Image (spheres, rainbow, N blue to C red):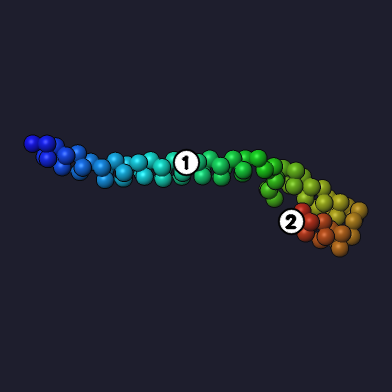
Amino acid sequence: MGGMMGGATEGWIPLWIFLGLAVLIAGGVVVARVLGTRGEADQPQVRGAGSPAVQEARDALRLRYAHGEISREEYLQGKVELED
């Protein structure tokens, strides 16, 4: 009867090894995601081209060109710089 008990418990060993590996892999994925997103949060945010400040600068550039305060070349150069 002792031989049967040993055989029954040996069947669980591969299951425990599999579960242990699954937990380690899942933990590694969680750690990698946390470390990966933390670096992105520390970086300063750059205002996009659609931000209110850029739109205000474009409007001011257009007005200065419309009023004759700047030349066409200056207007086009300012427009290119605001798109970057």
The residue nearer to you, when weighing 35 against 63, is 35
Task: Tell me the residue at 81%/61% (across/down).
Answer: 76
Task: Tell me the residue at 29%/41% (across/down).
Answer: 16
Real-space Cα separation, disc 2 to disc 1, in angstroms? 36 Å
Q: Which quarter of the rendered picture does the N terminus lie within? A: top left
In which quarter of the view is residue 56 placed?
Answer: top right
The residue nearer to you, when weighing 26 against 48, is 26
In which quarter of the view is residue 42 placed?
Answer: top right
Q: Which quarter of the rendered picture does the C terminus lie within? A: bottom right
Q: Amino acid at mark 2?
A: Asp
Q: Amino acid at mark 1?
A: Val
The residue nearer to you, when weighing 72 against 32, is 32
Residues at circles 2 and 1 in contact by the CB criterion of under 8 Å: no
Density class for disc 2 (Cα within 10 Å; few <14, some 14-19, many ≥20) is: few
Residue 11 is left or right of residue 24, and the answer is left
In which quarter of the view is residue 8 placed?
Answer: top left
From the top left corner, tell me how far across and down residue 31 is, in percent: 50, 41
73 up-or-down from 14: above or below: below
Q: Which residue is mark 1?
A: 30
**Looking at the rendered structure, which numbered label has been put on residue 84?**
2
Task: Tell me the residue at 15%/42% (across/down).
Answer: 7
* Element marked by disc 1: helix
